[in-house]
Image (tube, rainbow, N blue to C red):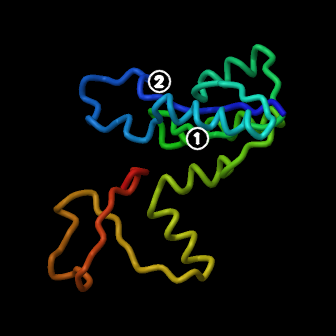
Amino acid sequence: MHIGLIYDTFDAYPWSDDAPPDADAEYEPEETVDTLAAAMKHLGHTPVHVGTPFDLREELDAGLTLDAALNIAEAAHSRNREAYAPILLEMAGVPCLGSDALTLSVTLDKAWTKDLVAAADVPTPSHRVCSGAADVDPEDLPPFPLFVKPRHEGTS
């Protein structure tokens, strides 16, 4: 099988000067991609280094055909960034290992994810969304310990 590798390396995207210092924290070193490719070869498959979801779009438009794809890309610059590769692959009829586009988009928002999980009757601790310190009333906090996480960051 020809299996596409969709991934982001540390130098995959241009960042503005005001980007946080960890903007590329979820991207991969080349060694990770090489290790995945070697494992595919070991299993008798042909790895196809595609690169980022933006590269995938260009390659599919140019006629790239794949039997399947492994997506470890995070992409950049959008709240739906992790869904780029899976939706392109779905549209092209290429099976993609891992979560689909909807799952990747929803789970980038921890509050939405908790609401969906709770709606499915899965026990989950209560949560609240705060935009800043002004939204927090110390008298209205639940008992400690508290887990405080950014709503939209994957590495938290």
Residue extending furthest toward the top: 62
* Residue 40 point in image, percent of width and height: 72, 37
Mark-to-mark CA distance, 2 and 1: 13 Å
Residue in the image at 52% along x and 36% along y: 32
Q: Which residue is mark 2?
A: 12
Picture coordinates of residue 137, whole percent (x, y) = 17, 74
Q: Neighbour class for label 1 at 10 Å: few (<14), some, many (≥20)?
A: many
* Side of 85 relative to 108 (left or right): right
Amino acid type indicated by mark 2:
Ala
Nearer to us in this view, 73 or 103: 73
Image position, residue 16 (x, y; %): 31, 23
Q: Which mark is residue 127?
A: none
Amino acid marked by disc 1: Ile
- State the image quarter where residue 33 is shown: top right
Residue at 52% over, 83% down: 123
Which residue carries the number 1 mark?
A: 72
Determine the residue positioned at 65% across, 51% down.
Answer: 102
